[in-house]
Image: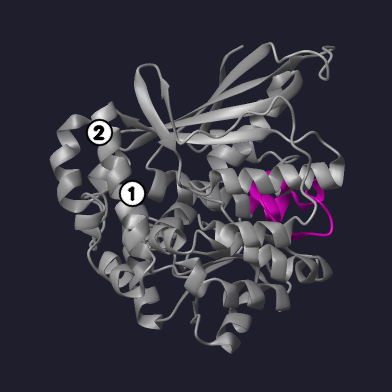
């Protein structure tokens, strides 16, 4: 029996549904072959496809519906055996991700997901990289807002630097029109899945050094001059804090891969996000510290998970944000790269060249994320010959660096551009 090109698992969830919507709109344009959706309930899958068919005007009656549950290993293997690429939208991945990765590898199925959980990604590489290589498949996490803009942004900046790139400082900012502030405060701006991943990530921050040491027992040497991460910094009269997402971790994995496998000089990468005025920044810092402390205890962690709106400052609600808010949310990554021009003596001189790249997009959680993961799946399907053989558990930058993924992202409202040299 021939396999489907793509199956979207967790299709009835908040993020999964949007992936299905985008797939319904794009599968003809990008010449996806037969595809399917998967979840725990046949009835919910049927209702979902009927709703999306009405919304998009596409006849989706032939799309295959697959019943699978993360608590049923047999159903996961049967699901994976029916497709060439599985898009996994079931999080938090710390709780539900490993059985799906395991089933995909056992079924010789390529796997992509939208997680932003560094501990999960490191652990999957430690446990399954060799098995994925033996199976000849790719397992690629962080194919959404975490961390396609940043990881592929580093690739983009390196391709356009024309010299030796030493370091990148990335500055993330968000924008929502002021007239939508009240609506955002009432209904939030992100869903509970992202909130759960954040809380669990904060709870087990102490795992990262141990996992990193197991993953890279002999890390790449520190490049000079060293550009250290700051807890907070100021740029253009605005304050920025160290970004708590997965970007630094994912970029680090990519740079380690390139050093160990291609002897490329690693790029130092520091990520920040805009917090605004000093007083507002101090308030965010105090709230973040409180969340980290509360996440350490099972009792208070459960309290955080059950009351996301209060503890997130209104950014997260159980019912999820409105389409009006998400569709009008914009983000910008300004990535400042420093290094040496071509021909410069890297060992004896300081960096003198700066190139600035910008990555922009809309709707980070349910727009940019779903377009990115679909384009990653498409790239695995159509450009495998440009990806590292034989496969393995990889970061996006190491898997897709020689493909046309950035061009596909540019064609789908995730814009990469050089703004200053």
Q: Nearer the viewer, residue 316 or 54?
A: 316
**Left or right: residue 19 compared with residue 77:** left
289 lies above or below 332: below
Q: Nearer the viewer, residue 272 or 83?
A: 272
400 lies above or below 59: above
Q: Is residue 301 magenta?
A: no
33 lies above or below 251: below
Label 1 CA crowd tier, 10 Å (few <14, some 14–19, many 20+): some
Q: Nearer the viewer, residue 229 or 20?
A: 229
User: Residue at point 56% right, 38% down?
Assistant: 150
Question: Residue 218, how many percent across, how many down?
Answer: 80, 52
Question: Residue 74, how many percent across, how many down?
Answer: 60, 88
Q: Is residue 380 magenta?
A: yes
Q: State which quarter of the image contains the N terminus.
A: bottom right
Question: Residue 71, how many percent across, how many down?
Answer: 50, 85
Mark 1 vs mark 2, CA separation in Å: 12 Å
| Magenta-drawn segment | 378-398
201 lies above or below 159: below
Residue at numbered disc 2: 280
Give the image quarter of residue 216: bottom right
Residue at numbered disc 1: 288
């Amino acid at each position: 029996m021939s396999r489907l090109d793509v199956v979207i698992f967790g299709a009835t969830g908040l993020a999964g549904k949007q992936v299905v919507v985008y797939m319904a709109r794009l599968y003809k344009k990008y010449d996806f072959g037969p595809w399917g959706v998967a979840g725990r309930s046949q009835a919910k899958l049927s209702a979902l496809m009927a709703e999306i068919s009405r919304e998009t005007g596409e006849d989706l009656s032939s799309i295959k519906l697959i019943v699978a549950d993360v608590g049923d290993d047999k159903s996961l293997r049967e699901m994976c055996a029916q497709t060439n690429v599985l898009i996994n939208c079931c999080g938090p991945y710390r709780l539900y991700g490993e059985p799906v990765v395991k089933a995909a590898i056992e079924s010789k199925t390529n796997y992509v997901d939208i997680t932003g959980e560094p501990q999960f990604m490191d652990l999957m590489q430690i446990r399954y990289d060799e098995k994925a290589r033996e199976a000849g498949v790719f397992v690629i996490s962080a194919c959404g807002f975490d961390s396609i803009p940043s990881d592929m942004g580093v690739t983009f900046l390196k391709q356009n630097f024309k010299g030796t790139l030493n370091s990148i400082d990335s500055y993330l900012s968000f924008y929502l029109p002021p007239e939508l502030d009240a609506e955002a405060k009432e209904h939030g701006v992100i869903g509970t899945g992202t909130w759960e991943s954040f809380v669990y990530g904060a709870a087990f921050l102490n795992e990262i050094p141990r996992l990193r040491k197991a993953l890279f027992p002999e890390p790449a040497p520190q490049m000079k001059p060293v550009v250290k991460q700051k807890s907070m910094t100021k740029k253009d009269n605005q304050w920025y804090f160290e970004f708590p997402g997965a970007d630094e971790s994912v970029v680090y994995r990519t740079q380690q891969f390139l050093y160990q496998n291609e002897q490329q000089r690693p790029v130092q990468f520091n990520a920040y996000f805009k917090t605004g005025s000093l007083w507002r920044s101090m308030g965010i810092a105090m709230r973040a510290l409180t969340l980290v402390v509360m996440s350490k205890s099972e009792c208070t962690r459960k309290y955080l998970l059950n009351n996301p709106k209060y503890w997130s400052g209104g950014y997260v609600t159980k019912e999820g944000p409105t389409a009006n808010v998400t569709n009008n949310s914009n983000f910008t990554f300004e990535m400042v790269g420093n290094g040496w021009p071509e021909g410069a003596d890297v060992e004896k001189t300081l960096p003198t060249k700066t190139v600035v790249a910008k990555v922009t997009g809309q709707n980070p959680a349910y727009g940019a994320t779903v377009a990115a993961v679909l384009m990653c799946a498409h790239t695995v399907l159509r450009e495998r010959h440009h990806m590292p053989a034989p496969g393995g558990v990889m970061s996006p930058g190491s898997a897709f660096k020689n493909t046309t993924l950035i061009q596909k992202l540019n064609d789908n409202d995730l814009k990469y551009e050089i703004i200053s040299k």
